[in-house]
Image (cartoon, rainbow, N blue to C red):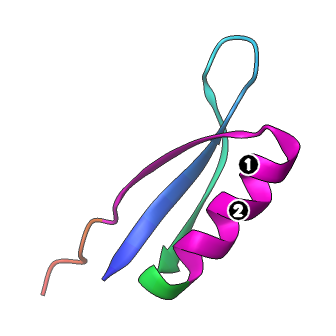
């Protein structure tokens, strides 16, 4: 499963940037963000239409 992770602006909460990663990478990214106090929004990535 893949997830979209969006980094949020500290002031107004708008999306600063985003990336799509596999499930194995989510924990590492969350740990890195927590270490520096970064706000994230994580949701399942949309599957491309087949």
Image mark for residue 31: 2
In the rendered structure, the answer to whether residue 17 lies left or right of residue 40 reads right
- Residue shown at 67% from the left, 66% from the top: 29
Q: Is residue 3 above or below residue 50?
A: above
What are the residue bounds of the magenta stretch? 25-45
User: Crowding at label 1, few (<14), some or many (≥20) Cα neighbours within 10 Å?
Assistant: few
Q: Toward the viewer: 37 or 46?
A: 37
Q: In the rendered structure, are the residues bearing label 2 and label 1 in contact, judged by CB atoms less than 8 Å apart?
A: yes
Q: Which mark is residue 42?
A: none
Q: Residues within 10 Å of mark 2 (few under 14, many from 20)?
A: few
Q: Residue 25: percent from the left, percent from the top? A: 58, 81
Residue 34: which disc? 1
Q: Is residue 34 above or below residue 10?
A: below
Please state, as top left, top right, bottom left or bottom right, where the C terminus lies in the image: bottom left
Residue occupying the point 57% across, 71% down: 27
Q: Percent x, y for residue 43?
A: 36, 54
Q: Quadrant of residue 13?
A: top right
Q: Residue at x 87, y 45 (%)?
A: 36
- The residue lying toward the viewer, choosing from 1 and 47, is 1
Quadrant where the N terminus is found in the figure: bottom left
Tell me which residue sits at (67%, 74%) in the image. Answer: 28
Residue nearest the viewer, comparing 26 with 50: 26
Q: CA distance from mark 2 to mark 1?
A: 5 Å
Which percent across, then down, holds residue 24?
A: 50, 86
Left or right position of 36 against 7: right
Q: Is residue 19 left or right of residue 33?
A: left
Membership of 34 in magenta stretch: yes
Tell me, yes or no, whether the highlighted magenta stretch contains residue 43: yes
């Amino acid at each position: 499963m893949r997830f979209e992770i969006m980094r949020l602006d500290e002031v107004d909460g708008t999306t600063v940037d985003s990336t799509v990663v596999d499930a194995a990478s989510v924990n590492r990214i969350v740990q890195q963000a927590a270490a520096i106090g970064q706000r994230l929004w994580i949701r399942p990535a949309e599957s491309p239409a087949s």
